[in-house]
Image: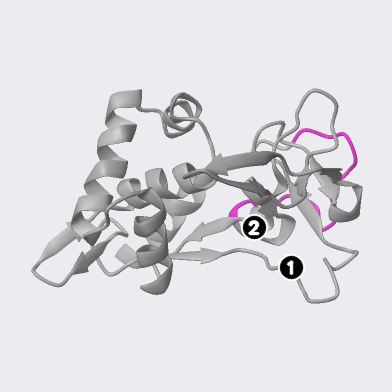
Amino acid sequence: MGLKLIRGNASDGGYVIEGDIHISLRELEALQLSALGIENKEAADQMGISVNTFRNHVYGVMKKLGASNRANALLIAIENGMLRASHYKHLLGWAPYEWVYCWKCNKAFPFEEALEVEGETVVVDHVTMKLPTEHKCPYEGCGSKVWASYIWSDVREAMPEFPEVPERDKVYKVDWSRKEAEELEEKIR
């Protein structure tokens, strides 16, 4: 599953919630990257900020939402429409035509080519449990988790010049900030 930021009513695309508390779009972006399982350093690099600033953004959104941890903040953000799952697993499996864009290697692949990796066994509070099977990017040396990727239609929404069906093994550089700038420009008009 991927997470999509939903633009809010604040001037920067964030949200103003009860008590005139402002949650910036950057804070929500940090929560989104954190929820996708991306390491702090890598997420900070992706946002173009320091690791400390990234952590401050995540902590800030947690505090503003009244959450005790990142998972709780994510749940509150989803329940309040600030974040949305960008694609879903259907009861009968994934749609066979669905292409996935890997944020790590910048390549696209049909979901059915994703590698199935047996879930690991973990111990939480003295309880042993087996995590579910994960799907990972099939490109050699990548191994990014599919749920931390984007569905191709979301990529095309940001980059309409990309083809409807991506080419295999081609690297696609997505400029997410360009889409945000265009949306902001459209709001101003």
The furthest residue to the bottom: 91
**159 left or right, relative to 90:** left
- Where is residue 100 shown, x and y percent of the image? 76, 51
Check if mark 1's residue and mark 2's residue have beta carbons within 8 Å.
yes
- Where is residue 143 shown, x and y percent of the image? 75, 32
Point out the stretch of residues depicted in magenta: 158-171
Q: Is residue 168 magenta?
A: yes
The furthest residue to the left: 19
> Where is mark 2, residue-wise?
1
- Where is residue 31 shown, x and y percent of the image? 39, 48
The residue type indicated by label 1 comes to Lys
Q: Residue at x 85, y 37 (%)?
A: 138
Q: Residue at x 51, y 66 (%)?
A: 84
The furthest residue to the front: 126
Q: Quadrant of residue 184?
A: bottom left
Query: In this rendering, is residue 94 above or below 165?
Result: below
| Mark positioned earlier in the residue sequence (1 or 2) | 2
**49 left or right, relative to 15:** right
Element carrying mark 1: loop
Element carrying mark 2: loop
Residue toward you, 132 or 91: 132
Colour logic: one colour
> Where is mark 1, residue-wise?
89
